[in-house]
Amino acid sequence: MHLPERSGLIRARLAGSAMAKGDILLFLDAHVEVSIGWLEPLIIRVAEDRTRVVAPIIDVISDDTFEYVTASDTTWGGFNWHLNFREMKRRNWDRSLPIQTPTIAGGLFAIDKKYFYEIGSYDKGMHVWGGENLEISFRVWMCGGSLEIHPCSRVGHVFRKQTPYTFPGGTATIIHHNARRTAEVWMDDYKQFFYATVTAARHVDVGDVTERQRLRERLKCKSFKWYLENIYPESPLPANYLSIGEIKNPSTKLCIDTMGKSGGQPPGVTGCHGQGGNQAWSLTGDGEIRTDETCLAGKEDNSLNMEKCSTNHPNTKQQFSYIPITKQIVHIKSQLCLLLKTPAMQLTLADCNSISEENKWELGHFKHVS
């Protein structure tokens, strides 16, 4: 079929799925190359359970040389890509078994056609492409289905360095519009993590999401907190959080900033810009001050560092508490307060002083708990 006008990936897929005659829909990007035996593993899993959505392992085809590079068969999908020890253990180390995955890439998957429509197909309010894979991933898991990646099915995909076409209204506007629709319908209070990181999305028109919210109610879908706790406990979004946003020293109007650095380096402070990004931090129920998978940590010399967040249990170096009355951040292990040393503008740990403005901090969207 050939649509009379440019419609974008999401609406093109909806048009194609409406015309499909088979019981199982297969969505594939145009710039892919399938391998021998790729189809049968996907079809079998969907036929065994119509609420399964199954994707192949996505190998890489170079956009310069068309070289085919195989990907790891232990890779699964989160909001970023991670190796999943929990799933390998569940499979008793049998690498031929499907891997349950929190999310799938939107370009390649198989789904029962009737089930596709029962759970709401695609969000017709989204434009072009972008974010539709997370939307359908959240929806499938939260509404009773499951997502899998089958290691016996492999499809090569050309990952282009840049998109060879334009987005009407601008790329950022389209991506933010789609992501905001996903956040507003499916992420509950956790949408604040998205807005704290991508503050520009707050100002993009989300459109009418009433129909999608009614779909969620009709399907009796679970909460996003359930999704984080049961499907994606490894997520960088903590299931229990006390604040999300800037950490601002009110007297200087400076905010703690990663300065674009990675783990093993100290954080810095810069003027609060309200754009999230490097200044978006969360204080978790475990006492972590984190941005994505990086946590603040107190060192033996009372300096402050950024480290990879502990995955199994809270690391005492990375635990803090916030006292709203005095606006102090206390490092639990040392019982010292986080201080902005002036005029050097350095972050350090020092004796707590309820009067000093150097150790007062305001946390974005702090939740007062008893």
Image (cartoon, rainbow, N blue to C red):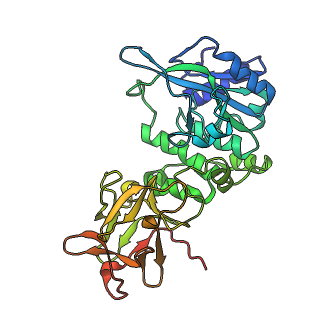
Q: Position of residue 38 (x, y in %)?
A: 63, 16
Q: Is residue 246 left or right of residue 104?
A: left
Q: Position of residue 314 (x, y in %)?
A: 52, 62
Work out which residue is located at the far front of the displayed protein and give it: 92
Identify the residue shown where x is 37% and y is 14%.
Answer: 65
Q: Is residue 291 left or right of residue 58?
A: left
Image quadrant for the C terminus? bottom right
| Relative height, residue 246 to residue 184 (above, below) | below
Work out which residue is located at the far bottom of the displayed protein and give it: 355
* Residue 272, visible in the rendered structure: no
Identify the residue shown where x is 41% and y is 14%.
Answer: 66
* Residue 5, visible in the rendered structure: yes
Identify the residue shown where x is 49% and y is 45%.
Answer: 176
The answer to which quarter of the image holds residue 369 is bottom right
How many numbered discs, if any? 0
Image quadrant for the N terminus? top right
Q: Is residue 335 left or right of residue 83?
A: left
Work out which residue is located at the far left of the displayed protein and give it: 343
Q: Nearer the viewer, residue 111 or 12?
A: 111
Q: Position of residue 266 (x, y in %)?
A: 30, 60
| Relative height, residue 267 to residue 211 (above, below) | below
Q: Position of residue 309 (x, y in %)?
A: 46, 56
Q: Nearer the viewer, residue 194 or 120?
A: 194
The answer to which quarter of the image holds residue 74 is top right
